[in-house]
Amino acid sequence: MISLRFPDIRLTTGRLFTGEDFDAFLVSELSLSTLCTFRIDGHIPENYFDKEEREALPDPDLISWRQLRPLVYQLIRGRRLPGQFKIVFRLAGHNVEKFLSQTGLSYRPEDIGGLFLNLHYSTQTLSCSTGTSLNVFDLSKNLDHEWDRMVQSFFRQRQIPFEQDR
């Protein structure tokens, strides 16, 4: 697990709320304080979509940031900055498979409980931390290290400047 800070908050939040950079992620949960506090559970109720609609989703259980972003943007739009927000992103299943293939890790996709990117804004500081969850027992930290590298590469490719917390 690593912790990163974003010195250019305006650029990073612009990419987050109006760009497509984070659209491939799923949203596990979100909290946002503006006029009041909003809490969003990203889990999609099983009976909300019919079978065909559900199969067309990137993930049948969690909403994608692409789907949720316009709603969140409407909540934060205005003259005042949010007091705080926290978004727990999760890598979608098909991207977990790509990640495992690219890194050469020996896990099966079903061994991975989740690869997480946690964004947090408060008191004019924007930061993120990484997290992993395994469904199998493993003492090595290989998954953690590779995910940390992948997240840093994600920000570099998108030219989003960051600093690593020590």
Image (tube, rainbow, N blue to C red):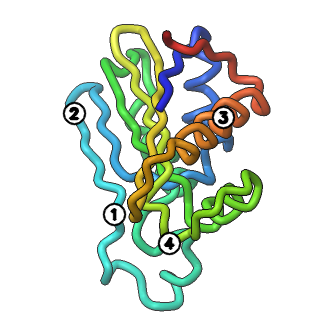
Residue ID for mark 4: 110
Q: Earlier in the sequence, mark 3 or mark 4?
A: 4
Residue 97, located in which quarter of the rendered image?
Answer: bottom right
Residue placed at 46% from the left, 91% from the top? 51
Q: Which residue, as the protein is rendered here, is positioned at the far front?
A: 139
> Would you say 105 lies left or right of 77 here?
right
Q: Earlier in the sequence, mark 4 or mark 1?
A: 1
Residue placed at 40% from the left, 70% from the top? 61
Residue ID for mark 3: 149
Compute the Cα span from label 3 to label 4. Answer: 21 Å
What amino acid is at disc 3? Arg
> Would you say 120 lies left or right of 107 here?
left
Q: Are marks 4 and 2 in contact (CB under 8 Å)?
A: no
Question: 124 above or below 69?
Answer: above
Residue ID for mark 1: 43
Compute the Cα span from label 1 to label 3. Answer: 27 Å
Category of crowding for the residue at label 3, using alpha-carbon neighbours closer than 10 angstroms: few (below 14), some (14–19), many (at least 20): few
Residue ID for mark 2: 37
Q: Earlier in the sequence, mark 1 or mark 3?
A: 1
